[in-house]
Image: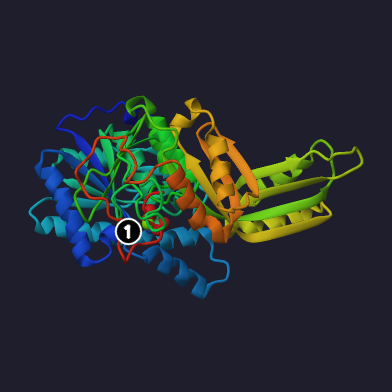
Amino acid sequence: MSLSSVAYVPVNGDIVVMKFGGTSVAAADDIRRAAGRIVAARENGRQVVAVLSARGKTTDDLLNMAHEVSDHPLAREMDMLLSTGERISCALCAMAIHDMGHSAISLTGSQAGIVTDSSHTKARILDVRADRIRDALGDDRIVLVAGFQGVSGDSRDITTLGRGGSDTTAVAIAAALGADVCEIYTDVRGVFSADPRLVPDARLLHVVSFEEMLEMAASGAKVLQLRSVEYARNHEIPIHCRSSFEDGPGTLVVSEKETMERPSVTAVTHADEARVTLTGVRDEPGVAAQIFGALAGANVNVDMIIQNEPVSADQKADLSFTVDPGDLHAATEALDRLEICERLETDERIGKVSIVGAGMRSHPGVAAKVFQTLGDSGINIEMISTSPIKISCVIAAGEVPAAVRALHQAFELGDGAIRREEPTGEEHRPAVRPDEDEDEGRGGA
Ligand code: ASP
Ligand code: MG
């Protein structure tokens, strides 16, 4: 982030960045609804930058198209292709806004000044050169920016930011413009205490800290892209996550200092993972570095790692780790080449259930209660990992729904539990729309 862009102070009224996800711009009516929200914010005196995702399943369709013509689509061309989805949304929305009597301009990520590194399909934002956005705002225009994309400063090629990357575009622009808030409009009402599809009495969380949201996004909550939360935390940009289909309080993601005294646990999350187990690994210095070096080289993100010290000196070690199921193939390929163990076994699908809460730091006995709850439900724990504000257990994939429900109830997170935040008077129905986009909402947790 360049200093000049961070130091920018808005002059003509507050700037708001509004991001609309794929389901929020899927059909023509959805685009008009999003346009209506944007125009309403403008008529309230705010300067509006809106970041849009590709419509509905467009990104998946584009990916499929690439694989129809090539077994190994070139990454550079893949980004040329994928970046078109967001451009379509923005151009259409600009037209709809124009019909509502306002002036709007759509910009590609590159035109909007989103400068990235050159790692195609998973680029990172390095700078936001927002002059063109500022100029357009100064001309009293609403600015629509295509999410999920930028341009490499080195190669000048178009890049994309990884699935769900429009969230990160929105937060980065909010930071560059000094916006008060980044509003993320999606197909769920906000972030919930658990996936409402598994837990009918899951509660809408009104305030979540950046740290909690980071842990939740990393452990399976789909509502915000992990990287966007990191970016928001680093630049202290509050995120307001809300439904584009109904009005409601939504969820504010803010610094911990602004959150209230919290209960020990805030949410239960879950995810699918895959596991690799290496047995007969040489017990000597440098071996783990070789294993995880090879995985890093293959661009595999490792989640949990467990290694036991062999009991006698001549014994070999066993080591297990978990990865995203989509990375399993790349992981085993990388390790096969290393020939570092006697056996390599994989579980293609295991479940992970986590509890997250900033209050955990000051409440003893939380781990014991998690293990007791799972034990009482007859659920076997296969791996455990913790952070100061999270406890995760790997369990059989089929036991995830029961585990999530049991933990949600044990920690009294449900709507029926004693309310720990100010009542809002709104009802708490499961928020997931029947036609919900898998990529976007997962009812928060
Ligand atoms: N359209 C892209 C995706 O589906 C980016 C986004 O929606 O944020 O991943
Ligand atoms: Mg999406």
* Disc 1 residue: CB within 8 Å of ligand 2: no
Q: Looking at the image, how many numbered discs can be counted on the residues?
A: 1
Q: What residue is pinned by disc 1? A: 432
Q: Is residue 216 above or below residue 361?
A: below
Q: Quadrant of ligand 1?
A: bottom left
Q: Amino acid at mark 1?
A: Val
Residue lying farthest to the left in this orientation? 101
As rendered, which of 74 and 26 lies closer to the eye? 26
Q: Residue at x 76, y 57 (%)?
A: 344
Residue lying farthest to the right in this orientation? 314
Q: Residue at x 39, y 43 (%)?
A: 413
402 to the left or right of 96: right
Can residue 350 be seen?
yes
- In percent of width and height, residue 329 lies at 65, 61
Residue lying farthest to the bottom in this orientation? 68
Q: How many other residues sit within 10 Å of disc 1, few (<14), some (14-19) or many (≥20)?
A: some
Q: Residue at x 38, y 30 (%)?
A: 262
The image quarter containing residue 87 is bottom left
The image quarter containing residue 56 is bottom left
Figure colour scheme: rainbow
Q: Secondary structure at mark 1?
A: loop
As rendered, which of 412 and 290 lies closer to the eye? 412
Q: Is residue 52 above or below residue 313?
A: below
- In percent of width and height, residue 231 lies at 41, 37
As rendered, which of 256 and 428 lies closer to the eye? 428
Can residue 226 be seen?
no
- In percent of width and height, residue 21 lies at 32, 55
